[in-house]
């Protein structure tokens, strides 16, 4: 599929025909055999020679290719340009017998083309998944890969407190670093030194280090807390040995400006020659903090709700004195299935603004809030779209159509388009009180997911299709059950027992298939959190099933629950309460 997405660049076709048989430099063939295998191309003896020459005057990461019956020449600006020129040439000659001679030049619209992967919210990819991902990013001409890490990198300090945690081992990180160097991808860490430390601060021995205004942040006035987090951070920085380090500082609105200033100065001193990078949101809200930053600082300006270029322009202007990278997202956090429509719009807005304002580039983020419920394979259409636009910021709709043709899942519009909440709210809510379905309207929720199910079943096949069909079927049956619990005075208890059995059956099938998809890409331990959520639904259904066998008790319990049902439109669920029901 990736072979079909290679850009032609500025191509001029010539009248001469060329027999497809080429002799590549032995050094390149031996160094990158996997690239030749991927494109199913072999170097032939005594055939048309392929010559590589470095031309530093070409744009960074750019290349030129010329082909005639006597030789093929690939000119490149740097190592990335050489690799991109090689893959483009191999894509053009793959599965061809005769080819028209041509001249081609190509270079990127944006210099920074990055992808950020969250490995701290429940899902740590296996090493094999990392290998596949890094090769994909290389083929798509990404040149930066960031790993978001809170407590999941092997660290001797953290091991004292969390000996059972599933982690990315240092040996695995070494393999990831090696692969990134091989494909000229800059690997760097995204760390936290102030906020987003709730998992570490949850330990009973470390709770005292939390800030009184924000329990997810350390108290920057506590010297012991700062030394601990600094020691953890130093080990992570040393493990990556990267030229860039993102030190975080996002979403710490509750922390006082004085504490932010103090902590920022401390952490900047830890970097020792690395280029500092930070999320930009706090600098937009507290511009005085910009005065602390070294001039070489790289700011990551994120806005995952920007759906048109103008949504990024104001913040980009506020940060104009620094190099900045705009950050769209794969809209899949707190979801099992991405919102492709808004993901594509968010990506296009970031790329257009970055090109218009001549910013460094874009970083596509993939966040795993709430257990990383979306399987990583479903993010691929957005990863490809961001790559296509970041290289050539044009043909936005045409590229979406191309991706939708190759990835039928990307044609499925928002699952929750007509609803005030996403599908996980209706999935995890209590089946009897069902506050989100009640507020949204039972029939409206059922109709919405019935329409979505019709689209999915009528779609061309895709690997996660059966999983999505089971999810939508489960939602419809569960909300229908809640509707029957909630409406009408005369309850058909036998029918409700039958409906509970149907929901449990689909839930078990969904859980088994989800487990199978997860294990294909991730380490197993993180799966437990999501299975715990499925188990909580099952536990609640079995309790109601037991109650239904005593009509008097059930009717009294039902009346008690329904009379106390309340939900403000802006209220969000207390997941701990839901899991413990």
Image (cartoon, grey):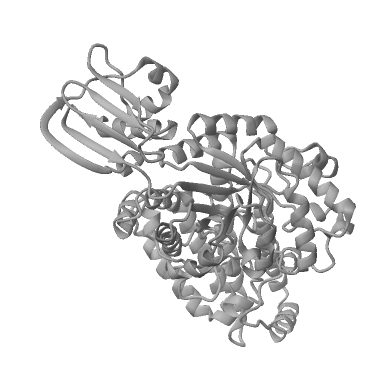
Q: Is residue 395 above or below residue 182?
A: below
Frontmost residue, 51 versus 461: 51
Residue in the picture at 71% in, 49% down:
150
- Where residue 166 appears, x then y in whole percent? 71, 41
The answer to which quarter of the image holds residue 544 is bottom right
- Quarter of the figure with the N terminus: top left
Q: Residue furthest left?
A: 15
Frontmost residue, 177 versus 332: 177
Frontmost residue, 483 versus 235: 235
Observer able to see residue 163: no
Residue in the picture at 45% in, 60% down:
350
- Left or right: residue 479 versus residue 539 is left
Observer able to see residue 54: yes
- Quarter of the figure with the C terminus: bottom right
The answer to which quarter of the image holds residue 559 is bottom right
Frontmost residue, 112 versus 173: 112
Q: Is residue 126 above or below residue 544?
A: above
Residue in the picture at 43% in, 60% down:
357
- Where residue 59 appears, x then y in whole percent? 37, 41
């Amino acid at each position: 599929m990736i072979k079909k997405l290679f850009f032609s660049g500025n191509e001029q076709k010539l009248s001469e025909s060329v027999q497809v048989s080429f002799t590549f430099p032995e050094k390149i063939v031996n160094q990158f055999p996997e690239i030749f295998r991927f494109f199913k191309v072999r170097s032939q003896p005594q055939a048309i020679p392929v010559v590589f020459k470095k031309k530093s005057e070409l744009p960074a990461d750019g290349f030129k290719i010329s082909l005639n019956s006597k030789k093929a020449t690939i000119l490149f600006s740097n190592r990335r340009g050489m690799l991109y020129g090689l893959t483009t040439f191999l894509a053009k000659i793959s599965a061809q017998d005769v080819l028209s001679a041509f001249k081609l030049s190509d270079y990127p619209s944006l210099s920074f083309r990055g992808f950020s992967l969250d490995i701290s919210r429940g899902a740590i990819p296996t090493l094999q998944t990392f290998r596949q991902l890094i090769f994909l990013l290389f083929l798509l001409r990404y040149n930066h890969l960031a790993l978001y890490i809170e407590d999941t990198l092997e660290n001797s300090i953290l091991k004292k407190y969390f000996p059972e945690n599933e982690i990315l081992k240092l040996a695995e990180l070494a393999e990831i670093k090696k692969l990134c160097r091989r494909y000229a991808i800059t690997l760097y860490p995204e760390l936290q030194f102030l906020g987003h430390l709730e998992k570490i601060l949850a330990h009973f021995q470390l709770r005292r280090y939390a800030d009184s205004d924000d329990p997810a942040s350390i108290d920057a006035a506590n010297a012991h807390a700062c030394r601990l987090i600094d020691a953890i951070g130093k080990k992570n920085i040393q493990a990556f040995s990267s030229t860039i380090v993102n030190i975080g500082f996002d979403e710490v609105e509750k922390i006082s400006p004085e504490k932010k200033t103090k902590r920022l100065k401390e952490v900047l001193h830890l970097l020792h020659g690395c280029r500092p990078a930070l999320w930009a949101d706090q600098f937009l809200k507290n511009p005085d903090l910009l005065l602390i930053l070294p001039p070489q600082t790289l700011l990551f300006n994120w806005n995952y709700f920007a759906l048109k270029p103008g949504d990024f322009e104001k913040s980009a202007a506020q940060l104009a004195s620094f190099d900045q990278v705009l950050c769209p997202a794969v809209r899949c956090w707190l979801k099992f299935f991405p919102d492709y429509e808004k993901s594509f719009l968010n990506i296009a807005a970031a790329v257009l603004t970055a090109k218009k304002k001549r910013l460094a580039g874009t970083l596509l983020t993939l966040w795993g809030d709430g257990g990383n419920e979306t399987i990583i394979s479903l993010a691929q259409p957005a990863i490809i779209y961001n790559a296509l636009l970041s290289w050539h910021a044009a043909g936005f709709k045409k590229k979406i159509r191309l991706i939708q043709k190759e990835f039928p899942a990307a044609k499925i519009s928002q699952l929750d388009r007509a609803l005030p909440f996403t599908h996980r709210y209706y999935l995890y809510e209590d089946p009897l009180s069902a506050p989100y379905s009640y507020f949204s309207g039972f029939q409206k929720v059922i109709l919405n997911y019935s329409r979505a199910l019709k689209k999915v079943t009528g779609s061309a096949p895709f690997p996660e299709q059966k999983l999505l069909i089971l999810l939508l079927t489960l939602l419809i049956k569960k909300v229908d059950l809640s509707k029957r619990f909630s409406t009408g005075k005369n309850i058909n208890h036998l029918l409700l027992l039958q409906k509970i059995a149907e929901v449990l059956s689909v839930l078990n099938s969904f859980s088994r298939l989800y487990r199978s998809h997860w294990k294909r890409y991730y380490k197993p331990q993180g799966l437990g959190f999501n299975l715990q959520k499925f188990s909580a639904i099952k536990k609640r259904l079995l309790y109601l099933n037991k109650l239904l066998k005593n009509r008097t008790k059930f009717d009294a319990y039902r009346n008690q629950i329904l009379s106390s049902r309340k939900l403000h439109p802006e209220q969000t669920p207390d997941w701990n309460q839901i899991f413990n029901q």
